[in-house]
Image: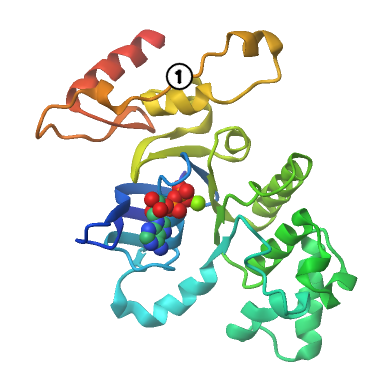
Amino acid sequence: MVEKLLEIKNLKQYFNEGKENEVRAVDDISFDIYKGETLGLVGESGCGKSTTGRTIIRLYDATEGKVIYDGVNVHDKKSKKDLKIFNRKMQMIFQDPYASLNPRMKVLDIIAEGLDIHGLVKNQTERKARVIQLLETVGLNKEHAERYPHEFSGGQRQRLGIARALAVEPEFIIADEPISALDVSIQAQVVNLLKELQEEKGLTYLFIAHDLSMVKYISDRIGVMYFGKLVELAPAEELYLNPLHPYTQSLLSAIPLPDPNYERTRVRKSYDPSVHNYADGEEIAMREVTPGHFVFCSEKEFKELKAISQSRV
Ligand SMILES: Nc1ncnc2c1ncn2[C@@H]1O[C@H](COP(=O)(O)OP(=O)(O)O)[C@@H](O)[C@H]1O
Ligand SMILES: [Mg+2]
C-alpha cells in the first residue's frame, strides 16, 4: 500500500512576476510523493529543479498552488503553529556543502543548530553526545566535532550536511544535487549512506539531479522537468525501459555506458519542442499512459502513446 506524504498541486514559482524579466521557473506542476520512497527529479540546468525543492520546503513562497504535507497545506499562512513543525519534518541537503556550512563555526555548533532552535536537548552534555552520535551515524567520529568545515574533504563535508539535516529527526529530505560536486569515487559512498539512512529511519527523499545516471540507482520513481514543466513521471525502471516523452528520450541518449560497442553506436538525440506541433488552445496535460506512467502531452499524443505502449506488451 502506498501512502501519500506530500501532494504538490498546481505549484507555480514565478520570479519577477509581471515584469519584463519574468521567469516561470516552476510552471504549474503537480505530483505526489509517497511515504518512504525516493522520488528522483531530473532535467538540465535551469529547468527549475532547485526552485521546486526550495518552494516545497518554503524557502520561497509559492506564486500559486499547494504543497500538502500530511494533509496540511504548508503554504497556507493561517497554520503558523503547524509550520514550525514542518520546519523540523522537512530538511534540505545542498549541492555545495561548503557554501552551506558556516566556515567560522565548529562542526559541533553547526550540527547542533537545529537541536538548539527546536529545543531538542536539555544541556551541554546531552547536546555534545547527540552531535557525536550524529557524526557516527554519517561515518565520522567525535574528534571531528571540534574542527572547522575547511578541515574536511568534499565527501566529508557532504556527510556533515547530512548529519545537520538528520539532527532534527526529519521525515522528508530534499537532496539537491548532493553528489554533483563530489569526485566520482566518492559519489557512490554518499548515495549508499543516503540509502542506508533511508532504510534505517524510514525517510522519504526528493533526490534532485541533472542527469539520469545516478538517479536510476537511488530512485523508486523519477520525474523529468523541462523549462518549469514536469514532462514525464514513471517508476524508475519503466522510465528507463519505455521513455515516452521525446525530451526524456534525449536525456537518456546522453548517458554514456561502459560498453564500447554501445558507445560506438550511441546516438545522442536532441529534443526539438516544435515536433509536438500543438494547435492553438490544445490542452496539454499530464496523462496516465500506463498505470503510474504519466506523460505531459495532448489528447492526440496520448492516444498515439497508448497505442505504442500496447504494442510493446
Ligand atoms: N532567485 C531567483 N531570482 C530570479 N530567477 C531565478 C532565481 N532562482 C532561479 N531563477 C531562475 O529560475 C530558473 C530555474 O532555476 P533553478 O530552479 O535553479 O534550476 P535548476 O535547479 O534546474 O538548475 C532559471 O532560469 C534561473 O535562472
Ligand atoms: Mg539546481
Q: Is residue 192 visible?
A: yes
Q: Which residue sits furthest left?
A: 281
Residue at left offset 34%, top offset 46%: 228
**Relative to 250, does residue 228 appear above or below in the rendering?**
below
Q: 215 left or right of 5?
A: right
Residue at left offset 83%, top offset 75%: 145
- Judging by the rendered image, the residue that carries numbered circle 1 is 269
Residue at left offset 34%, top offset 68%: 61
Quarter of the image for the C terminus: give it: top left
Instruction: Tell me the crowding category of disc 1: few under 14, some 14 to 19, or many 20 or more residues within 10 angstroms, Cα based.
Output: some
Residue at left offset 72%, top offset 49%: 190
Q: Which residue sits furthest bottom?
A: 123
Report which quarter residue 22 is drawn in: bottom left
Task: List x then y, in percent, for residue 27.
Answer: 29, 49
Q: Which residue sits furthest front?
A: 20
Give the colour scheme of this rendering: rainbow
**Relative to 132, does residue 248 appear above or below in the rendering?**
above
Q: Is residue 70 visible?
A: no
Q: Nearer the viewer, residue 276 or 67?
A: 276
**Relative to 98, does residue 29 appear above or below in the rendering?**
above
Task: List x then y, in percent, for residue 196.
Answer: 71, 50
Report which quarter residue 128 is drawn in: bottom right
